[in-house]
Amino acid sequence: MNYLRRQIWDIPESKHTSESVYRERKTHRREFLERMGIASAGLLLPWALSGCNEEAPPTVQPANVVDPPVPVADPENESPTTSSHYPAKRNPKFEYGRDETDREEAAKYCNFYEFTTSKSAYKYVDKFQPTPWEFEVDGLCGKPRKFDLDDVYKTFTLQERAYRHRCVETWAMCVPWTGFPLSELLKLVEPKPEAKFVAFETFNRPKEAPRMNEPTEPWPYTEGLTIEEAMNDLTLVTTGIYGQPLLKQHGAPIRIVTPWKYGFKSIKSIVKVTLTDKQPATFWNTLIPHEYGFRANVNPEVPHPRWSQRRERMLGTGEAFDTVVYNGYGDFVGKLYKS
Ligand code: MTE
């Protein structure tokens, strides 16, 4: 049984968050609990949701176990609109500094809690319909608007970026994402000066994604960044992986990737991007606030309340590395956190 013990580093949220943000988050959590008919937070057992609550199991398969191959291309994703855009030109500014993860290893080990708490999301996504797709950008901006996938492919020039990815559970991978900087999208809608945060929301379709029927979880999945983080060149609106459109389990057809933060910040299959003056509530922070902060920058010096963050293991090979602050992207984002 997976249970929580309070540790010395498990600082109450009120100690590291401003009072106003803390109160707002508490209100959101209380509203969520009330909506669910749960009178006290003590009755909610979010760690029954395993993924982000466990150290990753070993990822190296014993030699005598052979799984059937996992599809690494999805014919449903291929269309005349998309095919001419892949593979996109690689941006030489970004290098892994490690070996690239095998695409099948990445495709078969995913976190997508809308479908399953196991890592085999690819087995549960058949009903999910990532096309046609629309997402809207709204909130504190001069030109709110909706985009469909055609708009995305027409408006933005895609590039490929070799990024490291570090999950809070200590597994890591190196994959080539295809996309464009979120800053390009935000500039188009003209953020107002009052916009201090960007909130993201995933689709809400319990018929296609059965775990969204779980009444004790704050669906749809949400995430957020400060406006400075959102405008940082590293933050990528992502439509592809390994030179082709995203597989369903990787968050088709469009997701966010923030490689200096733990993986749960890289929200999949988004339908809404909202500019706001308030720190938005997020899925994991609402569910388990003392384990998953809003900022969630990779940092080996700050252990998760239940495990160390000093080392990480690569998907597929199991090779272990020391974890590096900001996942090694300090040159890009360190200046954001100077104060
Ligand atoms: N986005 C949504 N909507 N739902 C999720 O369950 N899982 C997060 C993140 N984005 C998740 C999500 C977590 S915990 C991780 S580590 C990454 O997606 C994993 O991305 P990948 O499965 O493509 O490797």
Image: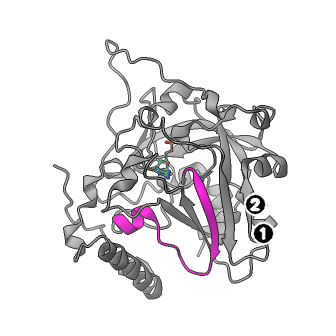
Q: Relative to 227, does residue 58 appear above or below in the rendering?
A: above
Q: Position of residue 39 (x, y in %)?
A: 22, 77
The residue that disc 1 covers is 189
Q: Between residue 122 and residue 12, name the one nearer to us.
A: 122
Nearest the viewer among 97 and 206 is: 206
Q: How many marks?
A: 2
Q: Would residue 188 be found to the left or right of residue 35 on screen?
A: right
Taking the magenta stretch, the answer to whether it contains residue 212 is: no
- Pinpoint residue 203: horizontal percent, then vertical percent: 53, 55
In the image, what residue occupies the spot 32% across and 45% down?
A: 55
- CB of mark 1 near ligand 1 (< 8 Å): no
Crowding at dot 1, Cα within 10 Å, few <14 / some 14-19 / many 20+, comes out as: some
Q: What residue is pinned by disc 2?
A: 185
Q: Is residue 285 magenta?
A: yes
Image coordinates of residue 316 in percent, x first then y, are 45, 27
Amino acid identity at mark 1: Val
Dot 1 lies on which element?
helix
Q: Position of residue 178 (x, y in %)?
A: 70, 41
In the image, taking residue 305 as reference, residue 181 lies left or right, namely right
Query: At label 2, which amino acid type do we have?
Result: Leu
Q: Is residue 96 visible?
A: no
Of the numbered discs in the image, which one, if any, rests on residue 103?
Answer: none
Crowd class of label 2 (few under 14; some 14 to 19; many from 20; radius 10 Å):
some
From which residue to which does the magenta span run?
268-287
For residue 28, which quarter of the picture? bottom left
Rendered-image quadrant of the C terminus: bottom right
